[in-house]
Amino acid sequence: MTKTLIRNGTLVTAAETFPADILIDGEHIAAIGQNLSALDAEVVDAGDKLVLPGGVDAHTHFDLEMFDTVSSDDHYTGHKAAAFGGTTTAIDFVPQTPPSNGQTDGFRRDVETWWRKAEKAAIDYGFHMNLTFFDEQVARHIPDLLEMGITTLKVFTAYNGRLRLDDESIFRALRIAKEHGMLVMLHAENGDVIEVLTREALEAGHTSPEWHALTRPPQGAADAILRVGGMAAHLNTPLYVVHMNTAWGVDILQYLRQHGAPVMGETCPQYLFFTIDHLRRPDGAKWICSPPMRTAEDNARLWEGLAQGILQTIGTDHCPFFFDGTHPIIYEGRPVAIPGKELGRDDFTKIPNGLPGVQDRLPVLWTEGVVKGRLTPNQFVAYTATNPAKIFGLYPRKGALVPGADADIVLWDPAKRVRYGVAYSHQRTDYNLYEGWELTGYPDKVFLRGHLIVDGEHWLGRRGMGQYLHRQMGEIL
Ligand code: URP
Ligand code: ZN
Ligand code: ZN
């Protein structure tokens, strides 16, 4: 077993900031304290770096087939990018196969498909299960997911005829989740309103990217959060609202929480910075995702929601596509081209929904959140590592700097300045949302279970070294 002693660091946890050394023994943190010594340990001097727990991104979509293409990062390329950005755990969503002839053999085959895809994993990972078909048989199989280490189900109130569940099914899924200590996650939009507005927009000849946002009104998120949040309140069972993007959504979440409902919320960096105006640019398709970008007022209320603790986490919803998938990029020395946003050049409904972000999350949030005084360093750690680890049943193995935890550790250089963009990023796509942004603060070294996987610009990780995380029931925050 190798030992590593990280000396003279300033540890930043969700609760406090303090000077300490960390001794790593094998894959775990063995000790934290002042002036630790271990003669047989390799010593790393943290110097003026901060020592953070590895980031936990509870919302990724690697190698996901949708919109006649596939998200352009897989479980290796996406994990490698995540690691360069300081994230050492990712939780991905398993799509549910429709029951055929009214028969389902449950979720095992779907989960096995995702396990196979993730054999190339480079950081540790878990899965959520998408629940997009629901009947008696499906209902009976939901508890099987626990044996597979999956304690969370995502339901959708949009994507009619594809992913959406009706309210009866969502209510019943919440009840089963309560019975088995599982957590339901909600994609909140109003699918019926979207259908009507999209049909009308296309009939009127509106095909440009901004219509993606105009046909998905923000009130749809609010009504879905209130409706499903109301069910969760009635049942007294937890609900986690993913990718929150609107001020109304934050207001409704606050209302539900003030009334004692166990409802939690996640936002993503893109919703803190961008607006519908980005969709109006000639390259507006780069910003197409669901739910869409809104207004500066929405951005501000989401920041406020974080500062006030109405929201609990910041994930990425990393689901990248090429902007122009007809032109290859060079990835690890080889040309790669994957059909992307150009598929919807003449019709916004055909633009693949999703954005890159798994590497960008921590560096962008440090600069825009911590350096600009919107978040304390401890809130930064809470929202990006500790809270998702707690909510998704990984704490204290992940998201914590405590003896016994996995030695997932980031030496964070708060002084490092980076001109960020696609050339700097390892995300396997041809653009970056933060192109040209001047960032201050970046990971210097990243350890995954004690293994140094990123050292400055150098990738020391390996395909297949990521471990599947059999998750437990989580906490309600
Ligand atoms: O546009 C997005 N967000 N694509 C990924 C799927 C989802 O709903 O999270
Ligand atoms: Zn979603
Ligand atoms: Zn998503």
Image: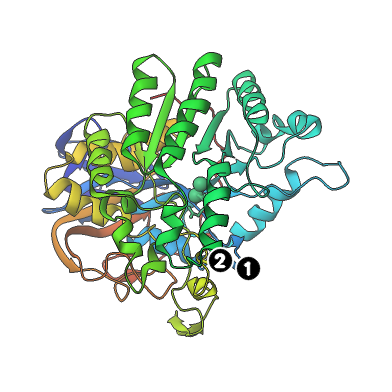
Tell me how far mark 2 sits from mark 1, CA to CA: 9 Å
The answer to whether residue 19 is left or right of residue 273 is left
Residue drawn at 58 percent across, 22 percent down: 181
Residue nearest the viewer, comparing 376 with 148? 376
Mark 1 Cα within 10 Å, few/some/many (few <14, many 20+)?
Answer: few
Mark 2 Cα within 10 Å, few/some/many (few <14, many 20+)?
Answer: some
Residue identifier under label 1:
68
Residue drawn at 39 percent across, 39 percent down: 266
The kind of residue tagged 1 is: Asp
Query: How far across and how far down the image is residue 53, in percent?
Result: 31, 44
Tag 2 and tag 1, C-beta contact below 8 Å: yes
Query: How far across and how far down the image is residue 141, in percent?
Result: 75, 33
Residue drawn at 39 percent across, 21 percent down: 256
Image-quadrant location for residue 107: top right
The answer to whether residue 12 is left or right of residue 382 is left
In the rendered image, the residue lying farthest to the right is: 101
Image-quadrant location for residue 270: bottom left
Q: Quadrant of the C terminus?
A: top left
Q: Which mark is residue 350?
A: 2
Q: Is residue 469 above or below residue 44?
A: above
Scheme of colours in the image: rainbow
- Callout 2 secondary element: helix
Q: Earlier in the sequence, mark 2 or mark 1?
A: 1
Query: How far across and how far down the image is residue 444, in percent?
Result: 23, 60
Q: How many marks?
A: 2
The kind of residue tagged 2 is: Lys
Q: Is residue 208 above or below residue 276?
A: below
- Callout 1 secondary element: loop
Residue nearest the viewer, comparing 79 with 164? 164
The answer to whether residue 416 is left or right of residue 356 is left
- Note whether residue 122 is visible: yes
